[in-house]
Image (cartoon, rainbow, N blue to C red):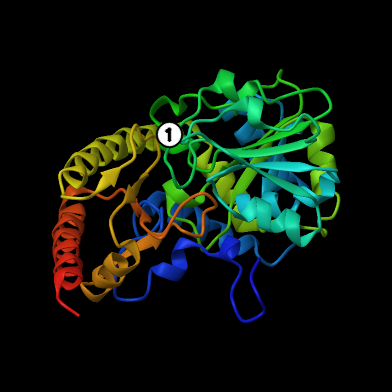
Amino acid sequence: MSTPEEPDPLRHHGDVDAAPGLLDFAVNVRGEAPPAWLTDRLAAALGRLGRYPSAADDTAAREAVATRHGRGPQEVLVLSGAAEGFALLPALAPRCAAVVHPSFTEPEAALRTAEVPVVRVHTDAEYLLRPERVPDGADLVVLGNPTNPTSVLHPADTVRELARPDRVLLVDEAFGDAVPGEAESLAGDATTPGVIVLRSLTKTWALPGLRAGYALGPPELLARLAAPRPPWPVSTLVLEAVTACSEPAAVAEAAHAATETARDRDWMADRLAALPGVYVHQPAAGPFLLLRVPNGDRVRVALSRDGIAVRRADTFPGLTPDHMRVAVRPSAEATALLHALRAALDTVSDAAEMPA
């Protein structure tokens, strides 16, 4: 673990790498702002800020999410971002938590802060889930699908193998709506025991500053998760955003965006893999790619000097300083990354060959 002088690597996130003025491939958010129709919906809700968020607003949001996923409203908990769901995990009082890695680190950070015993369960060499590696005694299991930062999409049936009656299985689907057809999602699964699915609005709808998301799961588990929350835990604007982004037109727009992102990802992956020394992990399913490059630390510095931000990946358990994550962007932006990465690789290679 870190010392007081060293930040906890589990708390490192891409926004730290995305310094102002850099072309941002470090943060997995589509676009620079929400679409105009969503901004208009939020602006129209500003007139309600003079009163507390109402039970009617909460009910409307939960009903919209429930309809979107074929669940009941009692199976929905609206959150101030998926990150709030991770912060609430200690409320489940697990005796032993197993966190599948490499993956988003905030769940483990929250559990360790609450002094919950955590076992790291590493995927195989291709970052595939191996259910037999999860300890039988773990009464909470956490994994991402698709997984950040590997972009691996685990088969839903493989994920279900982790479920048991005396265990909570938390599946982080923050990028679930970025997968065409939402393949392998458990968001609509109300029958597998003990499953909680977390969803985020941040990525697809460019809402990182609003903090909006939700959890899906059995009502009794959601009640335990929500027990420590204060009154009015989410704002009127969050409730409006969750309602708006769960409506049929928005779901259709997100599906179209997922198809575009998949096309952009394939374009980027092919060209990145053609650069000398660059390994691109595939198949990839999320709106980001995991790369491995020689002298990764130095390459990231060179990219930054050339105006490009990428996400360091050595803060993810199981990865190294030679790993980095890049967000998928349209080809016009991605071309700038390709040119800069080629130049950075050349610069670092030339420096390594210079005599001492």
Q: Residues within 10 Å of mark 1 (few under 14, many from 20)?
A: few
Residue 76 placement: quadrant: top right
Seen in the picture, residue 204 relative to 182 is either above or below; the reply is below
The residue at 80%/45% (across/down) is 225
Seen in the picture, residue 62 relative to 356 is either above or below; the reply is above
Question: In this view of the protein, can residue 335 be seen by the observer?
Answer: yes
The residue at 29%/54% (across/down) is 293
Q: Is residue 51 left or right of residue 180?
A: right
Q: Which residue is mark 1?
A: 126
Query: x, y percentage for residue 248?
Result: 47, 31
Question: In this view of the protein, can residue 53 be seen by the observer?
Answer: no
Three-letter amino acid code at the position of disc 1: Glu
Quadrant assignment for the N terminus: bottom right
Quadrant assignment for the C terminus: bottom left
Query: x, y percentage for residue 110?
Result: 71, 57
Query: x, y percentage for residue 215?
Result: 67, 40
Residue 181 placement: quadrant: top left
Query: x, y percentage for residue 112?
Result: 74, 57
Residue furthest to the front in view is 356
Q: Is residue 303 left or right of residue 74?
A: left
The residue at 30%/62% (across/down) is 295
Residue 51 placement: quadrant: bottom right
The residue at 45%/62% (across/down) is 14
Q: Of 78 and 236, which appears nearest the observer?
A: 78
Q: Of 323 and 87, which appears nearest the observer?
A: 323
Seen in the picture, residue 248 relative to 245 is either above or below; the reply is above
SS category of the residue bearing label 1 = loop
